[in-house]
Every structure is written in structure tokens, then in C-alpha cells.
Image (cartoon, grey):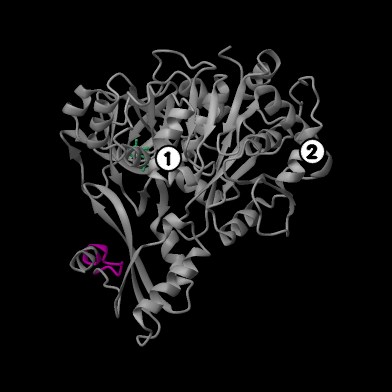
């Protein structure tokens, strides 16, 4: 069983346990889709794609939390195409950039799509094509994605305002799943396990719940944005849907913890928590352990470029007492961490050599789609003395203590806000596109080591523009270019951006200006 790939497993469940639920969105249709329906519909849609799409370019799958999005992902790979998930929160102009890069011959859209310049298959058409899916479970099509072929491409924030697409192969994904499916291993996942799908599919954290669930024959429960935004609705949602494996960012757990009913008495089924994507603070972990004393809480670490996560550690009371910050864990099998040369003069932390974290192993992405320049910079051949190994430069600072990794922040201007990965340069170049702006800088407001919000520092082309009108115009233009989580909430207007002696934006000075305001 261990050797079966994700597609082989889905095929097996569809053949042997076809009537088990694979995926459901309780807001739409509580009974969801069974493994047989999921697989047979995906094969049907794959046949359609084979007959209508003449290229092998990646296919953009646009939408939010619809089981037909999963049908679409699988249909792409079963027809020999990689797919690129794009959530509804991504603005149109950004989708244009993604389409320019992928040259998708068709877009599969489970929500209304803004443009028809690429052929679009909408939900109604997808459902119609799938409605005549065969009753028998056909074999996996021979043209399906396998081995070192790209399975999916996830676009992340790029520092110059153009998102970059991380190419994850079928082998990468299967290597990740053979590890993620054993995480928090006290009781194996089974058909009764209900995984929470909180992250949008364009964020690679969703791969942890979506594919681990399908790999183990479990059930995936999709939680829409509107439920996530309603504090009073989250705990009832978790209870009614018997969520047992909770995959999210620590920020989302913090939101849940605001509700005093978010505890093991109200949620007896909820016994496993998996965190990734940003720092799990001691405070959050400690509250969680008090509310769920017997639950398994797993802190995992990794970038999209190494298939979701590459290390993990179980967080216990003892670990919370002993470490602050918490460790991000031990590497998974076939993965190693290299701490490269010291950065920013920070050489030792508690006696440990601190430097940039490099990752090696069997889940390293192929690179950035169509961007050899960026790929060569980030994926390097690292000279270990005896050997040269392919390694990904994370841009994260950290150190190893007896084989366990500790994360100490970034060496560049990439940040995490509520779990979202953002390049500060991405926002700055988008603000600069505004005709009323002549210069700008974006400064993260940090509290207890965590980014809480963003502030925009702006120099206007015309000092006579009224400030509140300028702010309004900047925000409304920005909404067209970047997702909502990338829009700074506060703005300060200066006559000039302060510079350091070597001509860079003086970010330290800007932090103090913002603090004074
Ligand atoms: P993403 O590609 O969106 O998953 O973002 C990857 C980045 O998130 C990493 O390079 C880290 O900077 C950060 N990150 C991921 N996991 C953790 C963690 N457990 N603790 C702290 N930061 C993390």
C-alpha cells in the first residue's frame, strides 16, 4: 500500500470503497462527493480535456471551495496537464499575469470568471460533462502525470510584483504524502477521519489537508471564507461536521481560540492539530493544550518550494516550557537542513551556529515555472565538502540543536501576515503603479515577533492632494492589483523617503516614524 501513488490510491478507493465520502462542502451540499464520483467525474472531464485541449500547458483552475475544483485538479493531471489553483480572492489583473505565464489553453472555473479571453469551462458545463461519467471505475489513463512531471503549480508573491509559479512534481507530492500521512501517528488516518480544509487551494498549506485526506481514504470538509470570517460560526461548523484533523495556520487557530467553546468538551472529535506557514507562538500552543489536553499538536515547517512542509515536532507542555520560540521540528525522511554561512552578523544563537536555512531532499520543486533566472538563484548546488547537493535557499534564518530546527526570522523582506506569504516589494511595486504616487515603502508593524499589520509610507506626486482622498485612491487602485491581505491599512505621507548611507530605503527610520504616528 505504501508504494501506491496518490492517483493509484484514489483509483483504489473508488474501486473498492466507492460509496465513501471523499470531499464535501457543508454550505453547498452536505452529502458531498464519494470516491467513486470524484474519480469517475475526473476521468470524464480528463477525456473531455484530451479531446479539446491541444497543448500540454498548465491549466488554471479558478474557484473557491467546491468539490468540482477537486474534480478539476484531478482531471488536469489525469489528462497529462499540471494544474494551477487560483482562489477567488486573487484579483483579475494578477490572474492576467498568471495566464500570461502559464499560457493555459483553457480555464476550469467553478466560480464566475472575469474574462473570456481564454476558453473558460464554467461550473455548469463542468457538471454537465461530468454528469455522464461512466458507472464503472476505468483504469488510470496512460497519459496521466507521473514521476518528474509537474503535478501542480502554485503561484506565490514575487518581489517585483509578478507572482512566481512553484512547480511541484508527482514524485514531490508522493514523497511528501508518504510522510504527512504518518504525522501525529498515534492512530492512523482512516475513513472516519475528517480533515478540515481551511486554506484556499492557491496556498500550499491546502495540499496538506486535501491530498493527505485523499491519500488515506479520509473525508475532506471544506470551510468557505464566509464561515471563517464569522467568529460565532466556526465552532458549530467544526462540531456539526465532526472535524477530527485540524490543518491551519496558527493565526486561524488564534481566531478560533477567541470562542470559549472552542474546546474538547464541545469538540470531542477534534484530536489532531497541524500547523504550518508561520510561527506557532508559545501562547497559542499553551492555550490550545489547555483546551484540548489529549490532542496531538504538531508544528511543521516548510516553504511551497519544498512541497508544503519538511519538518515537524509534537508540541507538548514540556516543550512549551523549555523553548521560546518553539522548535519547528526534525526533518522528514530523505530531507536534510544545511545552515549556511552566517547572515547579518548573527553568528551564534544560544551557542548554535545561525545562518540561512537550506533544504535538500526529495520534495524540492523543479523550480519556478518559465523563470530559469529565479530558479538558478534559489535552487543551488551546495558544496558539502565531499559532495554537491541540490538545495533550496529558503531565505529563512535558523539553527539546529541536536538535529532539531529552530526558525529565527527572515534575511530579506518576505513576511507572513495571517499565514499569507508576502513579498514587501510586491506591494511596493503595485502602489508605485498609481499615478499619484512618486515613491513608497511598506513597513510591517511587528508585535512579539509577529507581523500584525502593514503600513504604507507614500510620497505623492502632488503635495496638494488631500491625504484622505489620496489614501482612498491608493487603496482602491491596489484592490485591483493584489489580494486583500496585501493591502496596507494605514498610510503616512512624507515629502521624501529617508535613505541609508548606501542609498537604500531606511526601514529602521521608517519604523520609528510609524511608531510615533
Ligand atoms: P509558504 O511558501 O507560503 O508556505 O511560506 C514559507 C515560509 O513560511 C517559510 O520560508 C517560513 O518563512 C515560513 N514558515 C513556514 N512554516 C513555519 C513555521 N512552522 N514557523 C515559522 N515560520 C514558518
Tell me if I can see residue 302 in this picture: no
Is 59 part of what is drawn in magenta? no
Residue at horizontal 63%, vertical 39%? 69
The quarter of the displayed image where residue 232 is located? top left
Q: Secondary structure at mark 1?
A: helix
Residue placed most toward the observer, 9 or 329: 9
**Dot 2 or dot 1, earlier in sequence:** 2
Asked if residue 299 is positioned above or below residue 103 in the image, the reply reads above
The x, y position of residue 243, in whole percent, is 45, 26
**Alpha-carbon distance for marks 2 and 1?**
35 Å
Could you tell me how many numbered marks the image carries?
2
Q: Quadrant of ligand 1?
A: top left
Question: From the viewer's perspective, is the residue at label 2 or at label 1 nearer?
Answer: 1
Marker disc for residue 247: none
Give the quarter of the figure containing the N terminus.
Answer: top right
Most prominent secondary structure in the magenta stretch?
A: loop
For disc 2, the marked residue is 129
* Highlighted magenta segment, given as a residue range: 501-510
The residue indicated by pointer 1 is: 233
Amino acid at each position: 500500500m505504501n508504494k501506491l501513488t496518490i492517483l493509484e490510491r484514489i483509483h483504489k478507493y473508488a474501486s473498492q470503497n466507492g460509496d465513501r465520502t471523499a470531499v464535501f462542502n457543508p454550505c453547498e451540499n452536505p452529502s458531498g462527493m464519494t470516491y467513486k464520483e470524484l474519480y469517475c467525474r475526473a476521468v470524464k472531464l480528463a477525456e473531455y480535456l484530451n479531446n479539446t485541449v491541444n497543448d500540454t500547458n498548465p491549466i488554471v483552475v479558478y474557484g473557491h471551495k467546491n468539490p468540482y475544483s477537486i474534480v478539476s485538479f484531478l482531471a488536469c493531471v489525469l489528462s497529462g496537464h499540471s494544474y494551477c489553483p487560483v482562489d477567488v480572492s486573487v484579483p483579475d489583473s494578477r490572474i492576467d499575469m498568471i495566464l500570461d505565464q502559464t499560457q493555459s489553453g483553457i480555464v476550469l472555473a467553478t466560480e464566475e470568471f472575469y474574462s473570456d479571453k481564454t476558453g473558460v469551462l464554467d461550473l455548469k458545463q463542468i457538471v454537465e460533462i461530468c454528469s455522464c461519467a461512466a458507472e464503472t471505475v476505468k483504469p488510470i489513463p496512460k497519459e496521466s502525470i507521473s514521476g518528474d512531471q509537474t503535478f501542480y503549480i502554485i503561484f506565490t508573491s514575487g518581489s517585483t510584483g509578478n507572482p512566481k509559479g512553484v512547480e511541484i512534481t508527482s514524485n514531490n507530492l508522493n514523497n511528501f504524502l508518504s510522510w504527512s500521512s504518518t504525522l501525529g501517528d498515534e492512530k492512523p488516518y482512516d475513513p472516519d477521519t475528517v480533515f478540515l480544509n481551511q486554506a484556499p487551494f492557491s496556498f500550499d498549506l491546502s495540499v496538506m489537508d486535501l491530498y493527505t485526506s485523499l491519500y488515506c481514504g479520509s473525508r475532506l470538509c471544506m470551510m468557505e471564507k464566509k464561515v471563517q470570517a464569522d467568529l460565532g460560526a466556526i465552532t458549530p461548523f467544526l462540531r456539526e461536521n465532526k472535524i477530527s484533523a485540524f490543518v491551519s495556520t496558527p493565526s486561524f487557530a488564534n481566531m478560533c481560540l477567541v470562542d470559549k467553546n472552542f474546546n474538547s468538551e464541545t469538540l470531542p472529535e477534534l484530536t489532531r492539530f497541524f500547523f504550518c506557514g508561520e510561527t506557532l507562538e508559545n501562547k497559542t500552543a499553551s492555550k490550545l493544550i489547555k483546551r484540548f489536553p489529549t490532542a496531538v499538536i504538531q508544528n511543521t515547517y516548510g516553504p511551497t518550494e519544498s512541497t508544503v512542509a519538511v519538518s515537524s515536532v509534537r508540541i507538548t507542555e514540556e516543550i512549551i516550557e523549555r523553548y521560546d520560540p518553539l522548535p519547528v521540528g526534525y526533518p522528514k525522511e530523505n530531507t536534510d537542513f544545511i545552515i549556511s554561512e552566517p547572515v547579518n552578523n548573527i553568528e551564534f544563537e544560544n551557542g548554535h551556529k545561525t545562518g540561512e536555512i537550506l533544504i535538500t531532499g526529495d520534495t524540492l520543486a523543479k523550480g519556478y515555472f518559465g523563470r530559469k533566472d529565479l530558479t538558478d538563484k534559489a535552487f543551488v548546488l551546495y558544496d558539502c565538502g565531499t559532495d554537491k547537493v541540490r538545495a533550496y535557499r529558503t531565505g529563512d534564518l535558523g539553527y539546529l540543536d541536536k538535529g532539531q530546527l529552530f526558525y529565527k526570522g527572515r534575511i530579506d523582506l518576505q513576511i507572513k501576515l495571517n499565514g499569507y506569504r508576502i513579498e514587501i516589494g510586491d506591494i511596493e511595486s503595485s502602489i508605485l503603479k498609481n499615478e499619484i504616487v512618486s515613491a513608497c515603502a511598506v513597513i510591517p508593524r511587528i508585535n512579539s515577533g509577529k507581523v500584525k499589520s502593514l503600513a504604507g509610507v507614500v510620497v505623492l506626486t502632488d503635495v496638494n492632494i488631500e491625504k484622505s482622498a489620496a489614501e482612498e485612491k491608493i487603496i482602491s487602485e491596489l484592490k485591483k492589483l493584489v489580494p486583500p491581505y496585501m493591502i496596507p491599512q494605514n498610510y503616512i505621507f512624507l515629502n521624501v523617503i529617508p535613505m541609508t548611507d548606501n542609498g537604500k530605503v531606511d526601514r529602521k527610520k521608517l519604523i520609528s516614524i510609524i511608531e510615533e504616528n
